[in-house]
Image: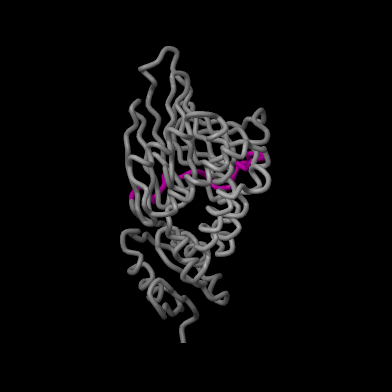
Amino acid sequence: MSAHLPAHPGTALPAPVVDAAVEWLVHLWSGTATAESRADWQRWRAAHPQHEQAWQQIEATDTRLRGRTAGMVTAATAVTTLAGPPSPRRRHALRGIGGLAVGGVAAWLGYEQLPWRGWGADLRTARGEQRSTTLPDGTRIVLNTSSALDVRYTAGLRRLHLREGEVLITTAPDDAATPPRPFVVDTPAGRIRALGTRFTVRHDGIASEVAVYDGAVELSPLDRPDATVRVDAGQSARLASGAATALSAGAADPAWAEGVLVASDMRLSDFVAELRRYRSGVISLAPEVAHLRLSGVFPLADTDRILQSLAQVLPVEVRVPVRYWVRIGPSA
C-alpha cells in the first residue's frame, strides 16, 4: 500500500473510483464484512493510488465530523465532494448511510462506540483495551485505548500510520536491511522519524503529542515537511499540520502502559477528560466542581471503582441515572 500521506480532501477523483470507495464504506458499515472481504478491500486500496486516495479522503471527512450525531448524516453526503454530483449507485448507497443517523442520544452513543476509525486497521483496540505487539523487525509497540494503527514495512522504509489514539514504541535496530531503513510514524498532523528511541505518539483528531523517553525523534508538520524539529529524551512536543512546538512539561514514562492513571494535583475536569478515554458512555461534570484538584494512582481496569473513590476524596457526589451515564456534581 502507498506510503504517502493522505491527499488533500479537495482533490477530484474519477466517479468509478468514488463509487467503489462508497460501496466499500457501505459494506463495512453493514456488519456483514468477513475476513475475506476485508482482505479484498485492502487489495482494492493497494491496487491503485487513486483507490487509497479516495479512502483516505473519506476518513479525513470522518475526522472532522466525529463525535456529533449530525456528523453521521454529513459524513455520508460529504463523500459526494470527492467527484462532483453522485451517480445513481452512489446516491443509493449514501441514502443507506444517512439512514443510520437517527435515534438522538442513543445514536450518538452507538456511533461513539463503533470502531469506525479502526476499521481495516492492522492493529486496533477498543475503548478501555490495551494491546502489546512485537513487529517483524523486533520493534515493540503498545496500543492504548481506542487506537488504530497500520504497519507498512517496505524494502526502503519502516512506516507506521497512527489513525487515532495513542501508541508507545520501542524501536529495534534494522538488522535485516543494509543500509538500515528509516523508521517513521505518520499521523494526520505530520511525520515523526525515530532516531533509535522509545517514545509515545498520541493523536487527538487535531494534533499529535509526542513524548520521548530514550533517544530522539524528528517531527515534520504535514503542511511544512521541511520545518523539522528535534525532540530529545525527556522532552515532549505537539505536532500540528502547520508547526511543531515544545510543551512545557517534560516527558515521564507513560503510566497507562502500566495500567494506571496517575494524577498529580490534577484538575478534576482534566482527570474526567482522561477517564472518558477508558470508559464507555457519558461522564458529565458540573462546572462548580471542575476546579477541584486530586492526586493519586488509579487502576484503569476498574473505572467504576475510580468513580466511586472520587466521592471519598473530594466534596462531590457521583450518580448514575441510567446505564452508561455518570453525573458528577457537588455533594449535598
Q: Residue at x 67, y 38 (%)?
A: 12
Residue 297: % across, % down: 37, 59
Residue 326: % across, % down: 43, 74
Q: Front-most of 299 and 7?
A: 7
Task: Look at the image and say whether residue 242 sits in the magenta stretch.
Answer: yes
Q: Is residue 118 left or right of residue 89?
A: left
Q: Residue furthest top?
A: 178
In the image, the segment drawn in magenta is 239-258
Q: Front-most of 113 and 281?
A: 113
Q: Is residue 299 left or right of residue 270?
A: left
Q: Residue at x 54, y 46 (%)?
A: 59
Q: Residue at x 56, y 50 (%)?
A: 205
Q: Hey, which quadrant is residue 229 in on the image?
A: top right
User: Above or below — where is 197 with respect to 295?
Assistant: above
Residue 121: % across, % down: 42, 42
Q: Hey, which quadrant is residue 10 in on the image?
A: top right
Identify the main secondary structure in magenta.
loop
